[in-house]
Amino acid sequence: MKNKKNDMQYRFRTRVITNILYSALVTCLIEVFLVTNVGMLAQYAKKSQWNNALMGMIYDSDLAVVLGYVLLGIMVFSITFLLLQERSVAYIGKISDAVRDISEGDLNTTIDVIGDDEFSGMAANLNKMVEEIRRLMDKEREAERTKNELITNVAHDLRTPLTSIIGYLEILSSKSAPLPPEMQKKYIDIAYSKSKRLEKLIEDLFGFTKLNYGKISMQVAEVDIIKLLGQLLEESYPNFSNKGLSYELQSNVSAKIISADGNLLARLFDNLINNAIKYGADGKRVLVKVHASKETVQVSVTNYGYVIPPEELPLIFDKFYRVEQSRSTHTGGTGLGLAIVKNIVDMHGGDITVKSDLNGTVFTVTLKVDFNIERENFGIH
C-alpha cells in the first residue's frame, strides 16, 4: 500500500514537472520568435519611412522591451500551464461533487475512473468506499430483517408447545373431578414430550446464535469419525423405532481418525440423522455411508422418504427455511437445524451438498482428515 502511494506521488510530481517544462518550452519558443521578429521589425521601421512611437520605443528602450518580454513570458507560461492542468482540475471538481453527494446520502454516486494517476486512484478508492458502505448497509438491513424474522419464528415455535404444556398442566391441577390414572399418565406424557420439544427448540436457537456470531471456540482434537457415527446412531435408536425406521452404517474402513471438534461434529451429524428420521419415515430406512481417503473423509446420510423439489434445494441450508411450510407437530421445528449443520461444516473448512430424487435424499459432508484451524483460517457464516 505504501509503495503504491509513493508510486502515485511520483507520477503526480512527474506530470507536474513535465507540464512546467512543456509550458517553459512553449514560452521560450514564443519569446525567441518575438525577440527575433519584433527586433528586426523595429530596425526596419527605423531605417524606412514607416515609423511610429511604438517602434521607436522598442528600438531605443532596451529596458522596457525586456520588461515587456518578461511579463509576456509569465502570461504565456501561466496560460499554457493552466491549459495543461485543466483536465485534472475538472476531474478534481467531479470528485468534489461526488464527495458532496455521498455526504448528503446519495450512495448511488459513482465516478468514472480515467487514466492511471493519483486522481483516478482517488476516484477508484471513492467508488470502493461507496460500494463498501452500501454493502455494510445492506448487511445491516439483512441483520435487522433476520432479527425480526428470528423473533417472529421463535415466538411462534415456542408458544405452540408451551400453550399445550400449560393447558395439560391446568387440567391435571384442576380441583374438579379427579382424572383416571391412565388419563393422568397420558396427559403427563404429552406435557413431557412437548417440554422435550421446547428444550430442543431452545437448544437450536442458542446453538445457531453462538455459531452464527462466532461465540464458540473450536477445540480441535483427534476424532474417530466411524466410532462417533456409530454412537450417534445407537443413541437415536428410540427415534428410529418410533418412526418404524431401520438404519445402516457402511464404511470402506473400520476406523478413521480425523482432526476436528468432536462436540461440533456430533451436533452436525446428529442434526443430519434427526433430519433423515423426520423426513424419511415413509422410506423405512436410513443409510449412513462413509468413504475415507488419505486426505478427506466423505459422509453421506440418505433417507428414502420425502423428495425435495429441485427449486428448493438451493434454499435448504438457509436459516428458518423448511421444506414443508406447515408448522405441524409432526415435523415442526425452528428451521435452524441445517443452517447449524452448514455453519459447522464451514468452520471445519469442509463442504456439504444435497441431492434429492426418487432414489433418495442424500446429504454429503466432505471433511479434511488433517484440519488445522490456524492454517485454514475459515470464517463463520
Image (cartoon, rainbow, N blue to C red):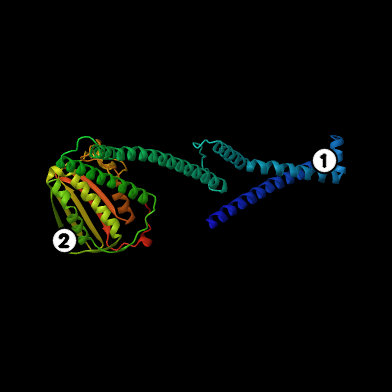
Image-based side of 131 in relation to 226, left or right: right
Residue type of the residue flagged with mark 1: Ala
Q: In the image, is residue 263 above or below residue 82?
A: below
Q: In the image, is residue 249 above or below residue 150?
A: below
Q: Which residue is the site of mark 1? A: 42
**SS at circle 2:** loop
Residue 179, position in %: x, y? 18, 38
Who's the residue at 38% across and 40% down the image?
A: 146
Residue 285, position in %: x, y? 13, 48
Image-based side of 70 in relation to 261, left or right: right
Q: Between label 1 and label 2, give the one nearer the viewer.
A: 2
Closer-to-camera residue (168/253): 168
Residue 381 at least partly seen = no
Residue 88 at least partly seen = yes
Image-based side of 69 in relation to 61, left or right: left
Image-based side of 361 in relation to 146, left or right: left
- Per the rendering, the mark at residue 252 is 2
- Per the rendering, the mark at residue 286 is none
The Cα atoms of the two marked residues, 1 and 2, are separated by 107 Å
**SS at circle 1:** helix
Closer-to-camera residue (113/103): 103
Residue type of the residue flagged with mark 2: Asn
Residue 104, position in %: x, y? 56, 36
* Earlier-in-chain disc, 1 versus 2: 1
Q: Are marks 1 and 2 in contact (CB under 8 Å)?
A: no
Who's the residue at 13% across and 44% down the image?
A: 283
